[in-house]
Amino acid sequence: MKKAVLVTGACMNTGVAIVEKFCKEGCQVVFTGRDEQKVSAALAKYKEKYPDAQVLGYAINSLIDERTVDEEAAKKMFSYFDEKGIFIETLVLNAADQGLNIVALENPLTDFMRVINTNMTWNYCLCELAVKRMKDNGGGNIVFVNSNTAYRAIPDRIAYSASKSGQLGMMRAMALDFGKYNVRVNAVLPGMIKTERWVKNPDFYKTVPSRFTPIGDVAVGEDVADAVWYFAKHARNTTGAELVVDGGNTIQLYPIIKNDN
């Protein structure tokens, strides 16, 4: 069996940086996305940039509907890896429903359920399937790409914050239960990241409070990728831990906003 890392949600933004980090380090990488065309396009870019890398794309959707996780699709994916002789030693859970535009008291309950099912139930499903194989192959590790909003709420994001807080509880419980199989489970907690939304909305992000970090800068995808890499490859005796990558935002009571006028 060939050892590989599986990175979910890796057709854009932070997921791309994580895939590229593992490619540069010579790892075999499998990544997922929801759309077949986007997965194919991302795969072509990875192969062009890293011609010697072993990288494979897989299109999969987490939900059948808001209430139902597609467990059979997950099982089919892992069976596909088994047939290919691929052992997922490292599982990086990056994909997420960000729960945008869900306004409390206005949106239907199914919007809340969709976010919880994507960010928690689906991830548990993937972990369960991965760990069943890890325990038979000497162990492995899981890294959740979480969020500092697990601790610091922002407006109109109740579902997202709840899912990320719950995800951390799940991570710690998994670390306890899976330790006996030599499986480590940890989480990276990014704050604001310079993604495509940052580039496309410069006026908004110029004044948003969370950009005013104690160290004066906001994370890029590579910062998150480095943290994921640490947990995956260097933290041999670390499990159930959190690594915050937010420029220090979480430690401050409120941002100190400079007025240049």
Image: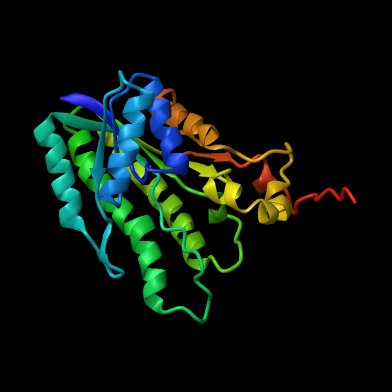
Q: Is residue 204 left or right of residue 161?
A: right
Left or right of 70, for residue 119: right
- Where residue 183 appears, as percent x and y from the top left, is 30, 34
Q: Does the image show residue 240?
A: no
Identity of the residue drawn at 72% across and 36% down: 215
Q: Nearer the viewer, residue 261 or 182?
A: 261
Q: Position of residue 116 (x, y in %)?
A: 38, 63
Which residue is depicted at the point 35% across and 42% down? Answer: 176
Coloring scheme of the render?
Answer: rainbow
Query: Which quarter of the figure has residue 163?
Result: bottom left
Q: Is residue 102 above or below residue 34?
A: below
User: Looking at the picture, how far across and down is residue 47, in whole percent?
Assistant: 31, 27
**Is residue 226 something one can see in this rendering?**
yes
Residue at 40%, 21% (x, y): give it: 24
Q: Nearer the viewer, residue 225 or 136?
A: 225
Q: Position of residue 231 (x, y in %)?
A: 44, 30
Residue at 58% in and 43% down: 194
The quarter of the picture where residue 234 lies is top left
